[in-house]
Image: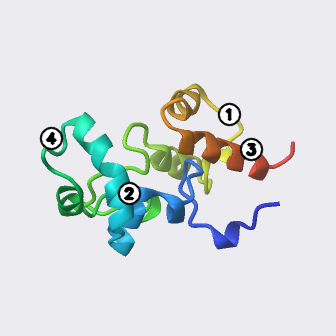
Amino acid sequence: MIDVSKLKLAACGVDCGECAQYKVTMKQDLKAAELLAGWFKSQGWIGEGEGVEAVMKKAPLCKGCWDITDDCFWKCGCGSVDFRECCEEKQISHCGECGDFPCGHYLAWVDMHENHKEAMARLLLLKPEE
Protein backbone atom coordinates (compact mmCIF):
# COMPACT_ATOMS: atom_id res chain seq x y z
CA MET A 1 0.00 0.00 0.00
CA ILE A 2 1.19 3.52 -0.80
CA ASP A 3 1.74 5.86 2.15
CA VAL A 4 0.04 8.97 0.74
CA SER A 5 1.22 11.05 3.70
CA LYS A 6 4.78 10.83 2.30
CA LEU A 7 3.77 12.13 -1.14
CA LYS A 8 2.93 15.59 -2.38
CA LEU A 9 0.21 14.23 -4.59
CA ALA A 10 -1.12 16.31 -7.47
CA ALA A 11 -4.72 15.95 -8.58
CA CYS A 12 -3.51 13.84 -11.53
CA GLY A 13 -1.58 11.47 -9.28
CA VAL A 14 1.92 12.73 -10.04
CA ASP A 15 4.16 12.82 -6.97
CA CYS A 16 5.28 16.45 -7.15
CA GLY A 17 8.42 15.61 -5.20
CA GLU A 18 9.60 13.50 -8.15
CA CYS A 19 8.60 16.01 -10.86
CA ALA A 20 11.41 17.94 -12.59
CA GLN A 21 9.28 21.07 -12.98
CA TYR A 22 8.44 21.07 -9.28
CA LYS A 23 12.10 20.41 -8.35
CA VAL A 24 13.28 23.37 -10.44
CA THR A 25 10.73 25.66 -8.79
CA MET A 26 10.89 24.52 -5.20
CA LYS A 27 14.50 23.30 -4.90
CA GLN A 28 16.27 25.21 -7.71
CA ASP A 29 17.47 21.77 -8.85
CA LEU A 30 19.94 22.23 -11.72
CA LYS A 31 19.88 18.53 -12.68
CA ALA A 32 16.09 18.73 -13.06
CA ALA A 33 16.48 21.87 -15.18
CA GLU A 34 18.96 20.00 -17.37
CA LEU A 35 16.38 17.25 -17.90
CA LEU A 36 13.80 19.85 -18.96
CA ALA A 37 16.03 21.79 -21.38
CA GLY A 38 15.50 19.49 -24.38
CA TRP A 39 11.76 19.46 -23.91
CA PHE A 40 11.63 23.24 -23.48
CA LYS A 41 13.57 23.61 -26.76
CA SER A 42 11.20 21.25 -28.56
CA GLN A 43 8.26 23.35 -27.37
CA GLY A 44 9.89 26.62 -28.44
CA TRP A 45 10.01 27.94 -24.87
CA ILE A 46 13.78 28.42 -25.00
CA GLY A 47 16.14 28.82 -27.96
CA GLU A 48 18.45 26.22 -29.46
CA GLY A 49 21.56 27.73 -27.86
CA GLU A 50 19.92 27.98 -24.44
CA GLY A 51 19.96 25.47 -21.62
CA VAL A 52 19.72 25.19 -17.85
CA GLU A 53 19.94 28.93 -17.16
CA ALA A 54 17.05 29.66 -19.53
CA VAL A 55 14.93 26.94 -17.91
CA MET A 56 15.70 28.37 -14.46
CA LYS A 57 14.57 31.82 -15.63
CA LYS A 58 11.13 30.36 -16.46
CA ALA A 59 10.65 29.34 -12.82
CA PRO A 60 8.37 29.15 -11.03
CA LEU A 61 7.33 26.41 -13.38
CA CYS A 62 5.09 24.55 -10.97
CA LYS A 63 4.49 24.74 -7.23
CA GLY A 64 2.15 21.77 -7.35
CA CYS A 65 -1.38 22.05 -8.68
CA TRP A 66 -2.84 22.66 -5.22
CA ASP A 67 -0.49 25.63 -4.71
CA ILE A 68 -0.60 27.42 -8.08
CA THR A 69 -0.22 31.17 -8.23
CA ASP A 70 -0.47 33.65 -11.08
CA ASP A 71 3.30 33.57 -11.55
CA CYS A 72 3.39 29.82 -12.25
CA PHE A 73 4.41 28.85 -15.79
CA TRP A 74 1.75 26.14 -15.67
CA LYS A 75 -1.68 27.23 -14.52
CA CYS A 76 -2.58 23.65 -13.78
CA GLY A 77 -0.63 20.62 -12.67
CA CYS A 78 -0.22 19.05 -16.09
CA GLY A 79 -0.16 21.86 -18.60
CA SER A 80 -2.94 20.46 -20.78
CA VAL A 81 -6.01 19.33 -18.87
CA ASP A 82 -6.90 20.97 -15.57
CA PHE A 83 -7.40 17.93 -13.36
CA ARG A 84 -7.19 20.16 -10.29
CA GLU A 85 -10.22 22.16 -11.36
CA CYS A 86 -12.17 18.96 -12.06
CA CYS A 87 -11.25 17.54 -8.63
CA GLU A 88 -12.28 20.78 -6.94
CA GLU A 89 -15.68 20.67 -8.68
CA LYS A 90 -16.18 17.07 -7.56
CA GLN A 91 -14.75 17.79 -4.06
CA ILE A 92 -12.15 15.02 -4.29
CA SER A 93 -8.41 15.00 -3.54
CA HIS A 94 -7.23 13.36 -6.75
CA CYS A 95 -8.54 11.73 -9.93
CA GLY A 96 -8.31 8.25 -8.37
CA GLU A 97 -11.26 9.13 -6.12
CA CYS A 98 -13.49 9.85 -9.12
CA GLY A 99 -16.12 7.31 -10.15
CA ASP A 100 -15.22 8.00 -13.81
CA PHE A 101 -11.49 7.31 -13.33
CA PRO A 102 -9.76 6.89 -15.67
CA CYS A 103 -11.78 9.16 -17.97
CA GLY A 104 -10.97 9.85 -21.64
CA HIS A 105 -9.08 13.06 -20.83
CA TYR A 106 -6.96 11.21 -18.29
CA LEU A 107 -6.19 8.34 -20.67
CA ALA A 108 -5.11 10.79 -23.39
CA TRP A 109 -2.86 12.57 -20.86
CA VAL A 110 -1.32 9.26 -19.74
CA ASP A 111 -0.07 8.60 -23.27
CA MET A 112 1.98 11.83 -23.23
CA HIS A 113 4.77 10.79 -20.82
CA GLU A 114 6.11 7.89 -18.76
CA ASN A 115 5.52 9.85 -15.50
CA HIS A 116 1.85 10.00 -16.40
CA LYS A 117 1.70 6.20 -16.63
CA GLU A 118 3.27 6.01 -13.16
CA ALA A 119 0.69 8.50 -11.85
CA MET A 120 -2.17 6.38 -13.21
CA ALA A 121 -0.71 3.22 -11.65
CA ARG A 122 -0.40 5.06 -8.32
CA LEU A 123 -4.01 6.25 -8.46
CA LEU A 124 -5.28 2.80 -9.42
CA LEU A 125 -3.69 1.53 -6.20
CA LEU A 126 -5.37 4.33 -4.23
CA LYS A 127 -8.79 4.01 -5.91
CA PRO A 128 -11.47 3.19 -3.32
CA GLU A 129 -13.04 -0.20 -3.75
CA GLU A 130 -16.68 -0.12 -4.77
**Residue 39 percent location from the top left of the image:** 32, 41
Provide the secondary structure element on which disc 1 rests.
Answer: loop
**Label ID, residue 124:** 3
Q: Classify mark 1: residues with Cα within 10 Å, few (<14), some (14-19) or many (20+).
A: few
Label 1 or label 4, whichever comes before in sequence order = 4
Foreground residue among 124 and 26: 26
Foreground residue among 87 and 71: 71
**Residue 57 percent location from the top left of the image:** 17, 62
Q: Classify mark 3: residues with Cα within 10 Å, few (<14), some (14-19) or many (20+).
A: some
The answer to whether marks 1 and 4 mark residues whose Cβ atoms lie closer than 8 Å is no
Q: Amino acid at mark 3?
A: Leu
**Label ID, residue 100:** 1
CA distance separating discs 4 and 3 = 39 Å
CA distance separating discs 4 and 2 = 20 Å
Which of labels 3 and 2 is toward the front?
2
Provide the secondary structure element on which disc 4 rests.
Answer: loop
Residue identified by numbered label 4: 48
Which of labels 3 and 1 is toward the front?
3
Residue identified by numbered label 2: 21
Is residue 102 found left or right of 88 in the rendered image?
right
Seen at 37% across and 63% down, the residue is 31
CA distance separating discs 1 and 4 = 41 Å
Q: Amino acid at mark 2?
A: Gln
Label 4 or label 3, whichever comes before in sequence order = 4
